[in-house]
Amino acid sequence: MKDDATIWISGTMHNIFSVGQILNELGFKILNVITWEKSNPPPNFSCRYFTFSTEQIIWARKSDKVPHYFNYELMKKLNADKQMKDVWKLPAIAPWEKSCGKHPTQKPLSVLTRLILASTKPNAWILDPFAGSSTTGIAANLANRRYLGIDQEEEFLTISKNRKIENPKTSATYRQKTGGFNDKKELELFLVEEPRTEYKTELNLDNKMGNQPNI
Ligand SMILES: C[S@@+](CC[C@H](N)C(=O)[O-])C[C@H]1O[C@@H](n2cnc3c(N)ncnc32)[C@H](O)[C@@H]1O
């Protein structure tokens, strides 16, 4: 990671505490712990616990000293001109997002789009080393960011490729259907307004000391 890069790690109550501890041990500075409240969680069939309806997403920066990027204004705009809170009420994954194949823990585009718009500038490199069906990549490309994904399962890489973001019709559909915006055209408007040339980075895989992808 670059010194000014930030990292997002999602988890549940089963693992998020250990992840937080490890980040602290590695010298990362935790910026927020977002609670994603699923507006339509699946029911709890055992009926012995409260229904699991949240996931936590830790946002941390690499260095205590190097400032991070936060698009405060955009987040405020998305929240009826009030400061965006660290609880995000967004729907669980919708059936249309699984039309290219089923990944067991696929994330909704709305969650990934919001965190990418909040913490990266246009053209930034975004790395997801646990890519799954590449929701991060779809969100990154929709928002004019660059993406590098890794997964150990070929089957999931096939789903990723099938999501065909390079087809203009498909990407227009994704843009229209991605939730978390005030209306269907809002994502489009934000993207048009963003200055595209502001943040030029190169990915140089041959040069170990070269620019590293942003996470
Ligand atoms: C929680 S899923 C990611 C889901 C993804 N965000 C999406 O929306 O589809 C985590 C992924 O990490 C992959 N994975 C787990 N351990 C890995 C490893 N050591 N190297 C590469 N990929 C790994 C799994 O195959 C799985 O697809």
Image: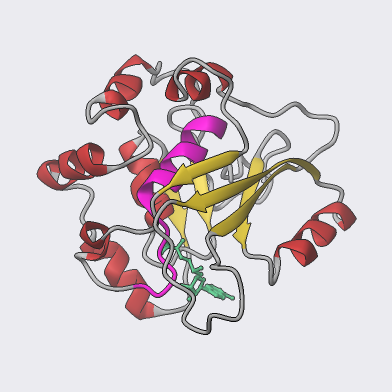
Figure quadrant of residue 173: top left
Q: Is residue 108 magenta?
A: yes
Looking at this rendering, what residue extends furthest in the bottom direction?
Answer: 46
Q: Is residue 22 left or right of residue 133?
A: right
Q: Looking at the picture, does residue 72 appear above or below residue 168?
A: above
Looking at this rendering, what residue extends furthest in the left direction?
Answer: 169
Q: Which residue is drawn at the image coordinates 61% and 26% (left, top)?
A: 70
| Along the line of sight, the residue nearer the viewer: 92 or 155 | 92
Q: Is residue 138 left or right of residue 74?
A: left
Q: Position of residue 16 (x, y in %)?
A: 71, 62
Q: Is residue 61 magenta?
A: no
| Along the line of sight, the residue nearer the viewer: 66 or 185 | 185
Q: Which residue is drawn at the image coordinates 50% and 45% (left, top)?
A: 126
Q: Looking at the picture, does residue 108 appear above or below residue 42?
A: above
Q: Position of residue 29 (x, y in %)?
A: 81, 42
Q: Position of residue 162 (x, y in %)?
A: 22, 64
Q: Position of residue 175 (x, y in %)?
A: 24, 38
Q: Is residue 166 left or right of residue 208?
A: left
Judged by its main secondary structure, the magenta piece is: helix
| Along the line of sight, the residue nearer the viewer: 25 or 52 | 52
Q: Which residue is drawn at the image coordinates 56% and 27% (left, top)?
A: 84
- The magenta-colored residue range is 103-119
Figure quadrant of residue 186: top left
Report how many numbered discs are placed on residues in the image. Answer: 0
Colour convention: secondary structure
Q: Which residue is drawn at the image coordinates 35% and 59% (left, top)?
A: 93
